Image (cartoon, rainbow, N blue to C red):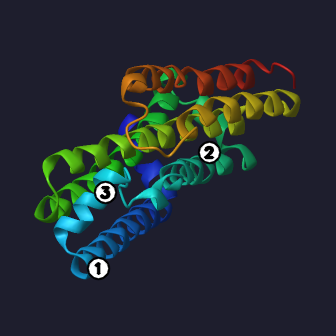
Amino acid sequence: MLKSIFIKEWLKTRLAVCLILASTTGLIGYLLLSLRSTIATSGAVETIATMIGRDMIFVNLMQFVPLLAGVCLAVVQWLPEMQNKRIKLTLHLPVSYTWSIGLMLAYGICCLVLTGVLNLSLLWAVEAVWLPAELIRHTLLTMLTWYIGGIAGYLFVSWIILEPVWKMRVGAMCIAAALLALFFLTPQPEVYNRFLPLLVLLTASCVLLPYYSIYRFKTGKGL
């Protein structure tokens, strides 16, 4: 049964997942080509000196891309469930709804994690040819915060969509906007290093929010 749920989620979201992976990988490729062009024009030494002196990482265009990916995946995955009332069928499967909903959430999170791993691995593999390890680490740690924010965005939007009452949805939107802003207060590289464990803990705790909405939906709260 759980395998069937996983297959259902893949069939429902495969186009969105492929588009997310292709677009993020394409943007990473574009940024790498831009960096390569800068190195070819100014020279490797001058480019590295500029990156150190001005605290530049050449990937600022990626700041909100993981968040957009998480939001899009949540909409594609959960909105049809609510609009077409398929969520009722899911809640009446011969397995606990905590398992079925948990698997659906895990599927979405795994898709985003896989996208992040592939994106960052590509960036690391190519930049390792041109840049010293310290600058690559500088870039990857900065981007890691954005990808964690993308997962948090996925969980917040899932919570909002699954919430059965519009008044509660508005409150959820306000909470989500305030907490997501914590991930994007500044694009300055590695500012969040000391707070990464807290951001990971915050994101992990957000898994409970969709369960709260599902519980309200299942018990008919506010309907």
Check disc 3 and report its element: helix, strand or loop. helix
Q: Nearer the viewer, mark 1 or mark 2?
A: 1
- In percent of width and height, residue 132 lies at 14, 53
Q: Quadrant of residue 210?
A: top right
The amino acid type of the residue labelled 2 equals Trp
Q: Quadrant of residue 27?
A: bottom left
Between 61 and 84, the one lying in front of the other is 61
Label disc, if present, on residue 45 of the rendered structure: none
Horizontally, is 65 left or right of 47 in the view?
right
- In percent of width and height, residue 100 lies at 49, 30
- In percent of width and height, residue 62 lies at 46, 57
Check disc 2 and report its element: helix, strand or loop. helix
Q: Residue at x 26, y 66 (%)?
A: 47
Between 203 and 27, the one lying in front of the other is 27
Q: Residue at x 23, y 44 (%)?
A: 137
Q: Earlier in the sequence, mark 1 or mark 3?
A: 1
Label disc, if present, on residue 51 of the rendered structure: 3
Q: Nearer the viewer, mark 1 or mark 3?
A: 3
Residue at label 2? 78
3D distance between C-alphas at marks 1 and 3? 15 Å
